[in-house]
Amino acid sequence: MIALALAILMAQEIQSSNSDGYTPPADSQPPLHINGYVDLGWAKAQGNGTSFAPGDMRIPADYGVDTFAPAVNSRGDVASTDSGGRFTNGFLPRSVGIGGYPSFLINTVDVDLRYQPSTAPLMLFTRFQLLPRVSSAGENTRVLVEQAFARVIPFASQELALTVGKSDSVFGIEYLENQANLRTGVTPSLIARYTTGQSLGAKAFYRIQIAPLWTAVSVNLAASNGGTLVETLQPQSASLTGTPVFSGRLGLEVNLPSLEVKLGLSALDGPRNDQSQPGVRQKALGGDARLVFGPVELRGEWITVTQDEGAGDKMNGLGRQTVVSKFDVRGGYGQLGLGFDFSGAVRRVAVYGRYDRRHARFEGFTPITVDRITAGARVDLWESLAMKGEYLMNRELAGAPNVANDVVTSSLVYTW
Amino acid sequence: MARGGIALALLVAACAAPPAPDPWKLWTIDQLEARHDPAIVEPGAALALLQSPYPLVGAKTGVQQASQRGLTVFPAFSEGKPAAYMTTEFWQNFDEIWVQPLYVDVTNQNLPIFGVDTSTRFYSPYWQIFTYSHPASAPEFRSAKDVLDAHLPLAPNSAKFCAITRDATLAAAIQQGESAPIRPLNGDAVGVPRNGAAYADGNAVRFIDLGNAQRFTFDPATRIVDETPLFAFALPGADGFPAQVDLPKVGGTGPLHNPRCDGRANCRGVIGGIPEFGSLWRVYEVLLPAPADVYVPANLPELQNKVRAMGFAATPAAAPLADEFILRVAVNGKACLASDPSTCIWLDSQNQIESQVVDWRITKTGTLVTCPLIEFNGKPVPFR
């Protein structure tokens, strides 16, 4: 993929005098841009901040509950993952370690470096994130290379982008809101863990506009180390099987003057990257839809994932685990938002509600069904400040013991 | 491939072309039953260890009772005395086994509830009891969720061994003509487990009950069950690697090189004849040195032939020994049996094996087995 991109670039340089070739924009900007945002938060979860029920001594502790439910920020970090010493097998999110106590948080300090030379249709992008957390090991700030990729748009006349490196997922639509400054609300959905992971590999995006129909069709394909699951579930920085995970989305969008409709079908197929056997597979299928009509935005997503039983140890972003259990899940969410734009200090006010539902089963364990009702609001001030507040009502509908794990959380994001 | 117990060795022999094993495999009692493992004998079927070439003991019918399946009673040795066990589960390549919760209603209104069922590879027959008091007005509880959702006080209690099964009649194998199970080879009486009813993860199940005394220990912080070595004898195979032989195994009493007993049944962790060890075993292969041999009485020529086919001399003893010595291995067997059996150095305890066999001949395997002792120190293990 890299060789292909370089070849295309070289060919363009040779043909730079041709009218079809790439021409730098007349109002060339400095090639290096430094941007970023800081996401400050305050959150309070019920109980001890986990989904582990008191008295539930089953092992692994994370197989019979939804540990991702008490999320407090846009990264999907939860208030706590402390199982009280009970063995867990790596089906956990990251934790901000506040338990059931109210706490201020620095969720993310984000620095983006974007290099976009005027002499080539190329963009180099690196996103560093600092994640200050406290854990049993004390204060600990994790430095994360969230994204690092090179993207080339080889043809000025075509909407084709080729990307290599670590970049956003191609599955579904929720990855578009991975970053706190872009997300309408505070927390990701219950299925975000399967669709929003940053992928290390290569991807290609192509979109064709059908102007008479106000319509566009797009294809987004990726071959990556770990697919689209978040890094705690499957590491991205190395392929543990030597075989890529393929994922992609076919999209259709209709952009009428007063109505915008976007539909997509996504799929994933490849080896589980939390173990080393290429024959131990994972598959996912999903659908998404968005509708924007005036101040109303309606969006929804659905997914089903199956993962094979494997042999040997499991390895994921949280370290070495044990049995590679067969896993099946299906779920989805629907979100209704209402947003109003203003001039002056208050630029936009939005309120939203989301309903999530997830049904999952680990090999041999009772299937669990959980849902979540989320309500929140966002106020954008000037160009660079967003204030968000959200309440998450988590419910255990079947299989998992009832536990107090609702969350109230908020976020102040300033973008620079 | 290592196997825990004679049953599993027979299993391998019975399968002409076994598929490659899943490196992380758990076989439960019902899976053993489904694949007709020798650990479980069908109603009216032959009890292989109570028929020729083994000595006929007890009622000498050599046939399982017609009314029920039975868990084969395997002879073993421990602390220099006969021992016996049943086999209910085994694991291949698991590093550790965890204790799971068992919720017990102290008012006896509700059946016991196992926290997990046998369908998960995290199932284990090792449980820690949590007691609760079932509210009179509450519906029947059938799962951990039912108990937890009631938000009742849960009191941690002792450890309990229970192997889950779907077979309501399964218990220790009993020979027709007998009323209780016996140890093959010498006919010793052994403990008699019962079959109980419970729920597991919402399902109605049965379980093999060895009583309420603690039959194993575990680390309360990690909830990992403590394992004990089970020594399986081996001889060099045709390929030069150790090959297990079909002889009674020797039960250890503590971690390798740290036994809880002195080799003569003076033990820590044995209360009222009930050992706190001897449920979860890690199989260790013991590659026997060339002078080792096996005692077989002269009146059992077919058993002598079987032992010789394994690669031993089965040297005729200069003087007969008691039946409790049948199939016992002596590290100096070839010499002592021929001259003076009283000078034999028997490999019949962890202490003896560790002192008489050099370390490099003792190899840890990836096999863990559940083989609850039903005879220890030559006496039935009482179930209470």
Image: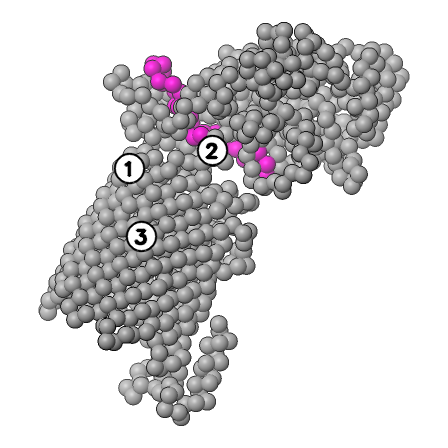
**Residue sitting at 45 percent across and 56 percent down?**
A269
According to the picture, the residue beneath numbered tag 2 turns out to be B119
Real-space CA distance between mark 1 and mark 3, rounded to the nearest whole angstrom: 19 Å
Real-space CA distance between mark 2 and mark 3, rounded to the nearest whole angstrom: 28 Å
Identify which amino acid the numbered label 3 is placed on. Trp
For this view, does A73 lie left or right of residue A82? left
Q: In front: B140, or A40?
A: B140
- Secondary structure beneath dot 1 equals strand
For this view, does B79 lie left or right of residue B197? right
Q: Which mark is residue A302?
A: 3
Real-space CA distance between mark 1 and mark 2, rounded to the nearest whole angstrom: 22 Å
The x, y position of residue A285, in whole percent, is 38, 54
**Magenta-colored span:** B91-117
Location of residue B105 (image quadrant): top left
Identify which amino acid the numbered label 2 is placed on. Ser
Residue B154 counted in the magenta span: no
**Residue sitting at 58 percent across and 41 percent down?**
B22
Q: Residue A266, can we see it? A: yes
The x, y position of residue A295, in whole percent, is 14, 62
According to the picture, the residue beneath numbered tag 1 turns out to be A397
Of the 4 image quadrants, the one containing the N terminus of chain B is top right
Kindly identify which chain the residue marked by label 3 belongs to: A
The answer to whether mark 1 and mark 2 are in CB contact below 8 A is no
Q: Residue furthest right?
A: B339
Q: Earlier in the sequence, mark 1 or mark 3?
A: 3
**Residue sitting at 63 percent across and 41 percent down?**
B19
Specify few, some or many for label 2: CA neighbours under 10 Å numbering under 14, 14-19, or 20 or more.
some
For this view, does B117 lie left or right of residue B351? left
